[in-house]
Image: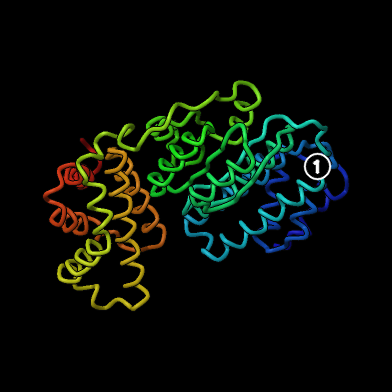
Amino acid sequence: MNASSNLRGGLLDGRSASVEHVAAQLWDAAVDGDERTAGEIAVRALQSGMDAETVLLDVIGAVQRKVGEEWAANRLTVTQEHAVTAINDRVVAAVSRAADPVPAPPLARVTVACVDGEWHALPARLLAEVLRSRGFRVDYLGAQVPASHLIADLHRTGPDAVALSSSIPTRLPAAHATITACQAAGVPVIAGGAAFGADGRYARLFGADAWAPDARAAADLLAGSPPGPPRGAHQAVDDLPHLLDQEYTMISRTSAQLVKAVFAGLRERIPALSRYTELQLQHTVEDLASIVDYLKTSVYVDDPELFTSFLRWTADILAARGVPAGYLTPALDLLGGELRDFPRASAILARARAGGRP
């Protein structure tokens, strides 16, 4: 379907439209790869009376959420997902340019950044633009910001708060280190993003000064009850004393060897692997690496549910692609054999093999 044809009777003739209708138009344009029309749809929504925050969060944000859902259901390829995300990012820029200027002086200064290793930058970008639209002074640092670079920037700019974003749970250890580093620099941290849990449990576990479930809530918090000065310097083991058992450290150091050992064991147990193409074998190794990454993160936060929920998600993804998920159970068995001397990791694996039941 050509996206431009959908605009007849919609926003481009100046008539008002519902948020859902505008989002549907933007989806069609983005999937078609029609960046120009996508930008026109969003800008015309502003011109028709829709406020910038609604366009950013309820139109562009809704389209981006659908991107993830469609990819998971195998209705979008990885390249399509990347293309639509890139268009959405440029539409955000178009909305920012077209929005009414914010009167001076600005409110508090906020640094918005993604955790090191976190490449999903659009949620943080949306937050940055929402804060700007509300009158905050914003330093947006983008994706994959190393903690040392972030701290150097905090010393340079002196913000009132850091909004730290992460969508990938395996980046939680890096998020924890970044939170403690920001607080040691005297800057409170608001954590947000799917990685911190739907209820913000990991943000609280790491001692973040605040947590927000979405960009609108984060902006409300900063405008109404911003966090005060952070607590004093602290180490990861102060928040997570179980790390003293060194399980996380040892699994992290041997991750590559664990993947290699489990893969070798699977080739012995599952004859069908001998007929895999090189690309299929590569994907299998990547899947095993993800399993090990999620296991060690579950060990880090001492939460078996993080690992079992990942396995359920993985099984659903494989099913949507018509790929047998039968190797997951023997992979867990083999991984359990390799980690038999690690009590917490073994308990997490045992729970996963039992289907997530205690």
- Is residue 55 or residue 319 the one in the foreground? 55
> Residue visible at 48% across and 51% down?
116
Above or below for 192 versus 228: below
Indicate how the structure is coloured in the image. Answer: rainbow
Q: Quadrant of residue 224?
A: top right
Please count the marks in the image. Answer: 1
Query: Which corner quadrant holds the C terminus?
Result: top left
Q: Which residue is at the front of the view, 18 or 336?
A: 336
Residue at horizontal 37%, vertical 57%?
319
Q: Amino acid at mark 1?
A: Ala
Looking at the image, residue 320 sits to the left or right of residue 76; the answer is left
Task: Give the labeled residue for mark 1.
Answer: 99
Residue 38, position in %: x, y?
A: 74, 55
Question: Which residue appears at 76% of the width and 54% of the height?
Answer: 39
Q: Nearer the viewer, residue 179 or 282?
A: 179
In the image, residue 280 lies at what x, y percent? 35, 72
Residue at horizontal 26%, vertical 49%?
Answer: 249
In this picture, residue 187 sits left or right of residue 301: right
Would residue 96 appear left or right of 354 to someone viewing this image?
A: right
- The location of residue 27, given as percent across then percent down, is 66, 53
Q: Dot 1 lies on which element? A: loop
Quadrant in the rendering for residue 344: top left
Task: Say whether residue 99 is visible.
Answer: yes
Q: Alpha-carbon neighbours of circle 1 within 10 Å: few (<14), some, or many (≥20)?
A: some
Q: Nearer the viewer, residue 207 or 80?
A: 207
Q: Residue furthest right?
A: 14
How far across and how far down the image is residue 349, in percent? 20, 47
Quadrant in the picture for the N terminus: bottom right
> Does residue 69 appear in this view?
no
Query: In the picture shown, does residue 98 fall above or below 84?
Result: above
